[in-house]
Image (cartoon, helix red, strand yellow):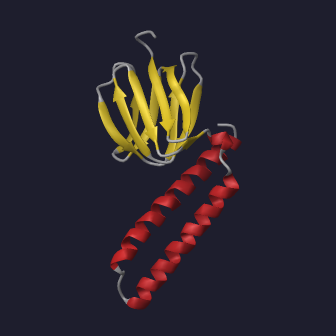
Amino acid sequence: MSEKTFKLTVVSPDKLLAKDLEVTSVGARGTEGDFTALPGHLPFLTDLKPDVVRFRLPDGQVKEIFVSAGFVEVLPHEVIILADSCEVPGEIDEERAERARLRELNNLKQLHEKAIRLGFVEEGELLSIKKSEIKLHRAMARIKAAKKARAGG
């Protein structure tokens, strides 16, 4: 490892997509916004939004991994991503993601219609709404990643 590179590890409960991979940069979308980590970066820890993590290899190639959510720890000589789930965008089942998107849109519509009928949102349903919104966002991010991979970049 040179002073122009650092290590990247990407792991989820069921997958190890990268282990001590030598990279020159890592870009991701955290809840506080997008960031790019470079060798020697100041340490920080943040949670990740469902999106594509981009990293550059020493030969200049840019690679991508989709993460559904999770945490990233950035250190001067290493980045560790602990993802809820992760996959290579070219391997995403776009039809399955679209079915999930439609299912969550329908679920949110039903919850919204019920709230309008009652004139209020029942306490337990606030959590259901939030969970559906998270699942919807994840499905939409997976679809976006799959379409971009299918288009070649």
With 50 as the anchor, is 119 left or right in this view? left
Q: Is residue 4 left or right of residue 104?
A: left
Outermost front residue:
14
| Residue 117 higher or lower than 42, as above or below | below
Q: Position of residue 100 (x, y in %)?
A: 60, 62
* Residue at 41% over, 28% down: 79
Task: Look at 29% across and 28% down and name the residue there.
Answer: 43
x and y percentages locating residue 12 in the rendered image: 50, 40
How many numbered marks does the figure carry? 0
Query: For the point 66% across and 57% down, which residue is it?
Result: 96
89 sits to left or right of 13:
right
Pinpoint residue 4: horizontal percent, then vertical percent.
43, 13
Residue 72 vs 85, above or below: the answer is above
Q: In front: 81, or 3?
A: 81
Residue 5, position in %: x, y?
Answer: 45, 16
Which picture quadrant has residue 121?
A: bottom left
Check the image and report above or below for 104 versus 7: below
Closer to us: 18 or 94? 18
